[in-house]
Image (cartoon, grey):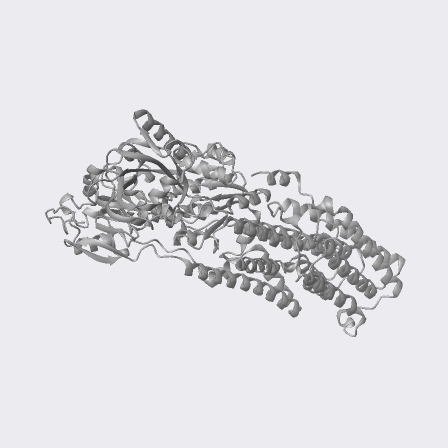
Amino acid sequence: MEMTAVPARARDIATPTELSSPGPSGAFWVRGLETLCAELRCGLDGLDGLGAVDAARRLERYGPNSDAGTRAGGALQAVLRRLLEPLALILIAAGLVSVVTGDVVGGVIIVAILGLSIGLDTVQEGHATRAAEALRHTVALKAEVRRDGSFVTVPVEQVVPGDILRMRAGDIVPADALVIDGDAFTVAEAALTGEPYPVEKRAGPVTSPEPAEASNAVFRGAVVRTGKATALVVATGPATMFGAAASVLAEARASSPFQRDLHAFGLMVARLTLALVLSVLAARVVLGRPVLDSLLFAVALAVGLTPELLPMVTTVTLSRGALRLAARKVIVKRLAAIHDLGAMTVLCTDKTGTLTSAEIALGRSLDPAGREDARPSRLAAVAADLGGDRSSLDAALVDHHPNAGRAWVLAGQRAFDYGRRTGSVLAQGPEGPLLILKGAPEAVLALCTARRAGEGTEPMGPEERGAALGQVRSLAEEGLRTIAVASRPWSGPMRPPGTADEADLVFEGFCAFADPPKPTAAAAVTRLARAGVRLKILSGDDPVVVRRLASLVGLHTTTVLSGSEVAALSDAALAVQARKVDAFGRLTPDQKARIVRALQARGAIVGFLGDGINDAPGLAQADIGLSVEGATGVAQAAADMILLASDLAVVADGVEEGRRTFTNILKYIRMGASSNFGNMLSMAVASVTLPFLPMLPTQILLNNLLYDLSEVGIPFDHVAPSATARPQIWDMAAILRFAGVMGPLSSLFDLLTFGALLFLFGASAEEFRTAWFLESMATQILVIFVIRTSGRPWRDRPSAALACSSLAALAAALALPFTPAGPWFGFQAPPLPTLLGIALITLAYLAAVETVKPWAARPPHRARHRRAEP
């Protein structure tokens, strides 16, 4: 196709001064060709293209037709970010003080554990990010633009506003542009608008400001399906609709829920540690105890209180979750996202490519009376097979009737005319020579004078046409797109049909097409609902289609908010509506992100599953962004996880995995709350009341080391189904409640141990320390078997890894005082009656923990209320 010749007077007319103002923005398609040419300083007589000098100036002024790179820091930045977490700072301080005060081994162990944890976390995320980058697809590589009066091929980055662009079937649109001329030109905009069907584009005025209704404009990232066209480039790079969506990747993202919770927990531990250490140090100094001994003891308390294995337990647990998800073909770009997926309470999802397969299928074949009849679709399949344009609708017809055209021979055809909106074939087959016409219902019905009635026909007048169009509207309300089929016997010589031959036709019926939901979608939606995750559809497609899809996948919604209705709502009003409404249609990319923010404002942990350019802002705004392998590069870059199998069932699997990892992390936290905190509190009390230290600093550090070793099996522990049934939250109030119950309970039995050792057994200072060391190790390690499950410990047994690590550490602790190495640590073997007394106290403690466990683990009323929020 060539454009009408125009005087070549506008090349190189623009000067840097004239280009000082930015190009058109907003709904450029409503402003018309003359206005746009004036704004772009190219003039109507410059439609033969820009000159090389002018194009170079514009490239310098507007920048390359590409997107700003994502902010991706290096490995050093990733390590520094983790080192600045409160928990890491506490561990570093404790390690350094331990080294300075003489405990080099203890300090090195603490720092080594922290370094290993941070290293694992950084390496895992680096591998995932590189794997995700390998999946990204290029939007376009080359483009045809008119320069100096002729079309040339240039790198897509060099396309500038004012260029004349030529596009053909199979091309990817490189920039936002206004169509100047077109021939059977259709594009697929599913990645931009969510509309699965190809959209016809043609020159002409448009008054609607909605991008989905811009029939005279094409947008960067769309794919040309049929025909060819020329267009005036209006916006490039970040100024395009694609670029606006991609720009979210250059913005710094807020901390994830897991990062916020871990930060808050670190601050809580830091405050408790500082308060306890300063109190003990001050009290001992006031009482006249040796300052150096008091300082060493206070440092040992700080190390004992600090959950130094938490970073490692967290990283190993999340890494194991990442490996399990990788086996299910999920790339985890950010380890913490596994936890966030388990905490998710609302999942927002696009429609096309996620809930649906984005593959058009024949849904119904109806006769003129609205009854199911294969004849209309069979005749349409004959026309599609013999003379179709291989559009998605034709492909669906042929797929449904793969052998329909074998018994027919093509005698002539008239290609689909986008002006008349019909196309026809003349075929010789079982019914003799037959003219078959298909196209838009309004256009086909206007050419029909009769309609099929069983084996015969009956007249068709205005009343029958009105009834047929009403049927089309009903099908549209079901989310189906309809074409009409008509025919007439052919008489005379066989030749290509003309427009005059398409008259006095017999209306055969309708073919209705759908973008059907995936077979697994409904079951996955039900599974997510049972897991406490509420699904919301955020689509750029027609609200009628969205409503139909929602009903098909099990969302019984009566209200679908459109993009225009969302735009009319204030943020407060949208927050209320977003909580109640589960389906949205005709949304712009920014509106998707705005709905996510509205849900987050109500306390929801929001996930977003999308694969298109228009999903990037929502993916970036969400607490957990999910994309798929075939998604656009922008969507993949914005996501935290990439599903190599585009299926909601994989998301449901990920939710369970996230909850499993968090449950195991919570076990470590609860152990620290029930044992570490209680034991350190007991030591603090004893240190200011006893005439000697209840445990030497080296014994405290040894206690802490053996205790930590006992917990290395936690990441591999089993998790009961009840623990993954609801969204998981890291609630500080619940953790404090658990510590507030279990810590004093542990201290109570410690004080009972102190009394028994002093007044019942008359233990010396060395025997006292040894006996309490044994009691402390036994209670700390064995209690994990009680608090690891909400059920009875003998019914919900631990994994072999946890049982082995715990019992091995306990055996080492119990044997050490009776070995030649015992005196090195200040141990003296207690007599048998003392050991029996400690065993009885330990059993009583475990029984008490099992008794109060349900009450201690019950979340506060506020937390229970928050879990009820959608």
Q: Position of residue 542 (x, y in %)?
A: 39, 37
98 vs 559: above or below? below
Q: Position of residue 694 (x, y in %)?
A: 78, 60
Left or right, 595 with respect to 108, comes to left
Q: Nearer the viewer, residue 419 or 260?
A: 419
Quadrant of the drawing holding the C terminus: top right
Left or right, 55 with respect to 599, comes to left
Left or right, 706 with respect to 64, comes to right
Q: Nearer the viewer, residue 829 or 166?
A: 166
Which residue in the rendered view is the most extreme toward the top?
Answer: 463
Q: Is residue 473 visible?
A: yes
Q: Position of residue 68 (x, y in %)?
A: 35, 54
Which residue in the rendered view is the most extreme toward the bottom?
Answer: 820
Q: Position of residue 781 (x, y in %)?
A: 73, 59
Total count of labels: 0
168 vs 593: above or below? below
Q: Is residue 260 visible?
A: no
23 vs 571: above or below? below
Q: Nearer the viewer, residue 483 or 636?
A: 483
**Residue drawn at point x = 48 percent, y = 50 percent:** 626
